[in-house]
Amino acid sequence: MPGQLLELNPPIVEHIEVGIFVVNSAFEVQLWNQFMVRHSGKTAEEVLSHNLFDLFPELPQKWLEKKLRSVFLLKHFSFVSWEQRPYLFKFPHNRPITGGVDFMQQSCTFMPLRGEQGQIENICALLYDMTDVAIYQRQLQQALHQLEETNNRDALTGVFNRRYTMQRLLNEAERAQRYHSPLSVLMFDLDHFKQINDTLGHLAGDEVLRVCSRHVVQLLRESDILGRFGGEEFLIILPQTDLDGVKLLGDRLRHAIEQLDVLIEDKTIQITASFGGACLMEGMQDIEDLIQVADLALYQSKHAGRNRVTVC
Ligand SMILES: Nc1nc2c(ncn2[C@@H]2O[C@H](COP(=O)(O)OP(=O)(O)OP(=O)(O)O)[C@@H](O)[C@H]2O)c(=O)[nH]1
């Protein structure tokens, strides 16, 4: 047979859609099937009796030598999955580049082959093309990630929804208590929003909510979390922020919202919002207490005439 110095079942070995190659204890190639020829671009004549690592410098030599030596020594099968090590050989693949994998993804089984005296003379490697599986798994993970993202977002504004915001607040409160770092929340509510709905229509009200939340997000830090709490009420979680910081941010956001021109059809309208801030204190039982204090501060802002910031 052209592709082998060893007698294995020739037609199967040559034509199976699995890479099969055999090396001896000096890592010299003893068998090289059609799959390996096709994907490596090297014919059996070019590789037989040559050292595998000289032929393919891209192989992870140190790791693979250790793996092969352990098969010789322990006389056991060994396996490496594409999930641990995406590929051994840099074989191209013919899948769309949008799949996001650079080379053929490979899993490999190493099988000890006994000589006539029962000693291990060679190792047969079976190389499986796992590219499709890897691409599907990647796509599945992306889809799950997107689903999770959508599940955490408010459909109208795209900011986080109430459930997710509460979950994050719980996590941030635990972290703040563990590391003794400040944590604040800033609640805000658009003023006279009902009037916008009543005079310009519900769709205009929706657009105001969208524009306003987009604008606020841009003014926050990466670590801040903006959530829509319900209706026209929002909550911002501010890790590493004390009451002075909340007041400062509240003033900045209040001013920014006041300055915002919201274009509804061909009219621009102005809006304002009232703010209430609170900082996590010792003695608070849970995050509900923190929200309650912020809510109270917000109520005071409304009560004092709206378009203002109160922190407690
Ligand atoms: N367009 C729109 N309106 C909403 C949405 N959710 C709640 N609203 C409306 O928001 C309005 C809130 O009214 P109020 O609670 O009286 O508050 P307000 O008019 O802003 O008055 P103050 O908060 O006291 O300044 C109601 O008319 C709700 O129908 C929404 O998703 N889209």
Image (tube, rainbow, N blue to C red):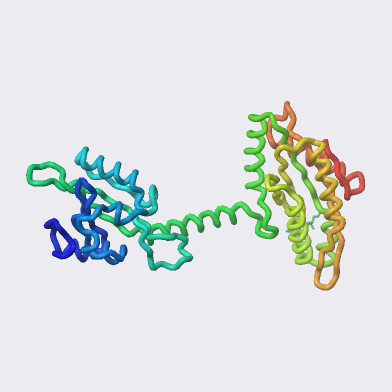
Q: Residue at x 67, y 57 (%)?
A: 158
Instruction: Give the residue at the far right of this rendering.
Output: 305
Q: Position of residue 174 (x, y in %)?
A: 63, 33
Q: Residue at x 70, y 58 (%)?
A: 157
Q: Quadrant of ligand 1?
A: bottom right
Rendered view: 242 above or below 129: above
Which image quadrant is residue 44 in? bottom left
Instruction: Give the residue at the far left of this rendering.
Output: 116
Q: Is residue 130 left or right of residue 204?
A: left
Quadrant in which the N terminus is drawn? bottom left
Q: Nearer the viewer, residue 165 or 103?
A: 103
Q: Position of residue 274 (x, y in %)?
A: 84, 48
Quadrant in which the C terminus is drawn? top right
Q: Position of residue 77 (x, y in %)?
A: 23, 45
Q: Position of residue 59 (x, y in %)?
A: 34, 52
Marker count (numbered): 0
Rendered view: 30 above or below 120: below
Q: Nearer the viewer, residue 142 or 162?
A: 142
Rendered view: 136 above or below 287: below
